[in-house]
């Protein structure tokens, strides 16, 4: 039962995939009947052999197809109305992305069943502040999103409940009507903008945009040159607040709490409250929600284990990752086809596989240094950093090649150089925000700005190297996925063979 939840999540995802690629001629009732029949038949036949319980995965797959089918939305009628749509009244339903001359946000019209992606142009002098929950009347030009070669932007937005794009002249096309929406989220949006404004006052403009991306995932104000440098080096994951950014912050917080002597049963709730605070300030980006769900499952299991309610060996990162995927797909089945979802879970799954005891990557590399405590600690850290970076590249390279037609040969080197610097920068930035109302804030902000400047310098130098980014055919993504799976399988086989020479690898081969 160690990987039972993994099988359930995979079966649910396969059901969604089958429904998308091979639209079933079965209605909701038929799919529900298939799921029920497969479940009952599996349980009945399990009396003869427990192997028949695998049939329950068929039932789960049918439920995945049912959820995907019931979650599909057609905007055909709305698409026809787009050319005549010139004026809408509604509510801002996202934390706006701010640039010097424009503001972008999701907008929920009162009289329409879907959302708009709105861009308000202010001109060179800047414009008014827009927050989550603002009630607005907008006048502007509305158009359908483009369907680009290799990327259907219209479908991508539709899966997020957005049916069109709207451009608005801020001076003439925006009228304020009041405040609506969730007041708690609006407060988080206001506080976020106040913190960003405070940062902008103590760090130089050329690094302020990187601070916005690193701490809050806001890339809108990043210069094209810096954004391109991060893209060419395969380091854009640092600019989108995601599981990695959250893990870096939580690792520092966890170290402080454990250093103070707090037991996990007390430390985990405090860390959990910090996760909720981060979500509140950042604005519930999908990538961070995924990471928060994963942390929630692991934290709950660890607390229950610390209280003696369950066995500690039953707390599994793999099971937590599967549970997070299952929850997300149940809520929004189309997330399976989001590049962000694929990159996030691909990287995390690969990292979990490498650092788990099943492969023992770090132990194998650091074993020669075990006689010296300091040398062993350094070796373990270095081995862990290399193993995690390699795993992340193996987990994301197939998706990057498939969706974007790019591979990044120097990405491992770039991550080994920049990620430790980004880690320190994030911790210093978090301390600076914590001290924003104290006299120490300018000093902490200056240190943060210096680290950000060093990051930009390193990334720009790396981006100038040859073969940093190489264009490939999308088919290479399939090949890379096969190679990654083969390597992981071979390492697992060798590890088991080393642990049990008589019955391990040789037994598997027989």
Image (spheres, rainbow, N blue to C red):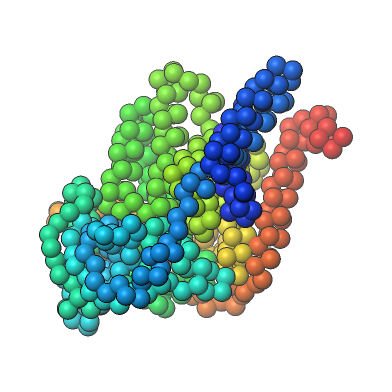
User: Quadrant of the rendered structure where residue 43 is?
Assistant: top right
Q: Is residue 58 above or below residue 406?
A: above
Residue in front for this viewpoint, 101 or 47: 47
With respect to residue 307, does 382 lie above or below?
below
Q: Residue at x 38, y 29 (%)?
A: 264
- The residue at 13%/63% (across/down) is 177
Q: Is residue 376 visible?
A: no
Q: Quadrant of the C terminus?
A: top right
- Residue at the location (27% across, 74% down)? 86
Residue 242 in percent (x, y) is at 42, 54
Within the image, what quadrant is residue 509 found in? top right
> Percent x, y for residue 68?
52, 47
**363 left or right of 138 in image:** right
Quarter where residue 61 is shown: top right
Instruction: From the viewer's side, name the closer residue of 253 and 214.
Output: 214
314 is higher (above) or lower (below) than 223: above
């Amino acid at each position: 039962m160690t990987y039972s939840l993994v099988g359930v999540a995979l079966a649910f995802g396969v059901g969604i995939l089958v429904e998308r690629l091979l639209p079933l001629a079965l209605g909701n009732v038929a799919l529900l009947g298939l799921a029920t029949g497969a479940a009952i038949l599996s349980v009945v036949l399990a009396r003869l052999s427990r192997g028949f319980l695998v049939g329950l995965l068929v039932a789960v797959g049918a439920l995945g197809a049912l959820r995907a089918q019931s979650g599909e939305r057609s905007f055909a009628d709305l698409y026809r109305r787009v050319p005549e749509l010139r004026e809408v009244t509604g509510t801002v339903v996202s934390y706006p992305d701010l640039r010097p001359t424009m503001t972008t946000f999701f907008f929920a019209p009162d009289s329409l069943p879907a959302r708009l992606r709105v861009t308000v142009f202010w001109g060179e002098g800047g414009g008014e502040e827009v927050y989550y929950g603002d009630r607005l009347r907008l006048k502007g030009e509305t158009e359908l999103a483009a369907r680009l070669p290799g990327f259907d932007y219209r479908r991508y937005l539709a899966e997020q409940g957005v049916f069109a794009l709207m451009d608005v002249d801020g001076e003439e096309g925006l009228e304020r009507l009041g405040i609506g929406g969730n007041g708690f989220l609006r407060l988080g949006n206001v506080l976020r903008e106040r913190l960003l404004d405070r940062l902008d006052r103590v760090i130089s403009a050329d690094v302020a945009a990187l601070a916005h991306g690193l701490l809050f995932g806001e890339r809108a104000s990043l210069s094209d040159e810096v954004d391109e440098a991060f893209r060419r080096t395969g380091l854009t994951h640092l600019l989108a607040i995601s599981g990695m950014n959250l893990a870096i912050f939580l690792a520092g917080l966890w170290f402080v709490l454990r250093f103070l002597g707090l037991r996990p049963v007390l430390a985990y709730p405090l860390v959990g409250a910090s996760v909720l605070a981060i979500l509140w300030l950042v604005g519930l980006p999908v990538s961070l929600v995924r990471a928060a769900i994963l942390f929630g499952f692991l934290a709950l299991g660890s607390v229950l284990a610390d209280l003696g309610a369950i066995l500690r060996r039953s707390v599994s990162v793999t099971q937590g990752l599967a549970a997070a995927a299952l929850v997300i797909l149940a809520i929004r089945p189309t997330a399976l086809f989001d590049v962000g979802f694929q990159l996030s879970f691909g990287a995390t799954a690969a990292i979990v596989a490498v650092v788990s005891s099943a492969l023992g990557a770090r132990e194998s590399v650091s074993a020669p240094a075990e006689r010296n405590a300091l040398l062993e600690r350094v070796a373990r850290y270095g081995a862990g950093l290399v193993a995690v970076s390699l795993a992340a590249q193996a987990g994301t390279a197939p998706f990057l090649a498939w969706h974007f037609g790019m591979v990044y040969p120097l990405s491992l080197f770039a991550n080994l150089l920049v990620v430790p610097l980004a880690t320190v920068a994030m911790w210093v930035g978090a301390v600076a925000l914590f001290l924003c109302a104290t006299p120490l804030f300018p000093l902490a902000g200056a240190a943060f700005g210096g680290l950000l400047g060093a990051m930009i310098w390193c990334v720009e130098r790396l981006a100038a190297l040859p073969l940093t980014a190489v264009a490939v055919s999308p088919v290479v993504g399939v090949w890379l996925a096969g190679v990654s799976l083969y390597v992981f399988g071979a390492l697992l086989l060798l590890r088991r063979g080393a642990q049990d020479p008589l019955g391990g690898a040789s037994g598997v081969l027989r």
